[in-house]
Image: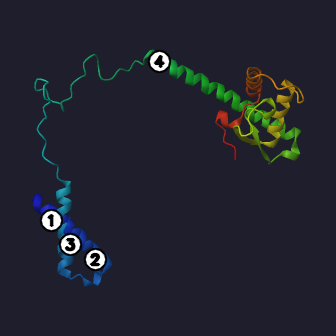
Amino acid sequence: MKALRGWLVPCAVVLLMLACSAPERLSSALERELETTFEETEALEMTRPPPRPPTREPGRGGRNRNQKEPRRGGSVFNAEPTREQRETARRRRENAAAEQVLRERYWKLKAEAEQRYPDKVGQYQEHHFWPRYLGGPANGKTFRVPAPYHQLLTNAFREKHPYGMPRPSEARAKQIMLEVYLEYPIPQLIGIVAP
């Protein structure tokens, strides 16, 4: 039967290709043969293969590798999370809660900015994550933000470190950025996708 199956499948494929490319060439006898071939192939496909004998692992005293045995050193499934898993879950919950607070703050500030700067509504600007006037690189990371909100960000940076003053140290610049971004979050960093 195995040899028959190996011969039937390629034959059926060839006949099917012939039937699709030139159906008028097939005689009714070949069509009947094709139908029986497919029926036999489906019958072969639907039968289960015989179960395999268990394989033995060399050097393990003849224990069966495919038998379900509990692992040594405890149960296979432990419903109790580890201390690290609990700590990771706690941090994720805290981060998710903090992100939600920042998202709400962003939407509120964006609405206020659109009221204060109505001429900029609908426009977008690139905001340098590390502002250039604070010593950030010219080709540094930028984020596309709504223009009214960008104006709020710029004003917040100007309050912390006005234009015209000498550039702050790197540590002071990072402190200014942290203070501003906690108050005025960048939307992409809190899961809001800008157009």
Which sits earlier in the primary sequence, circle 2 or circle 1?
1
Callout 2–callout 3 Cβ contact below 8 Å: yes
Percent position of residue 57, x then y: 15, 30
Instruction: Tell me the residue that label 4 is attached to.
Output: 84
Q: Residues within 10 Å of mark 3 (few under 14, many from 20)?
A: many
Q: Nearer the viewer, mark 4 or mark 2?
A: 4
Percent position of residue 189, x then y: 66, 34
Residue lying at the far bottom of the rendered structure: 24
Residue lying at the far right of the rendered structure: 164
Identify the image quadrant of residue 118: top right
- At label 2, the amino acid type is Ala
Instruction: Tell me the residue that label 2 is attached to.
Output: 19
Separation of marks 4 and 1 at Cα, in angstroms: 58 Å
Instruction: Tell me the residue that label 1 is attached to.
Output: 7
Percent position of residue 146, x then y: 77, 42
Which sits earlier in the primary sequence, circle 4 or circle 2?
2
Q: Is residue 158 left or right of residue 19?
A: right
Callout 4–callout 2 Cβ contact below 8 Å: no
Which element type, helix, strand or loop, lies under badge 1? Answer: helix
Question: Can you say which quadrant of the picture contains the N terminus?
Answer: bottom left
Instruction: Tell me the residue that label 3 is attached to.
Output: 34
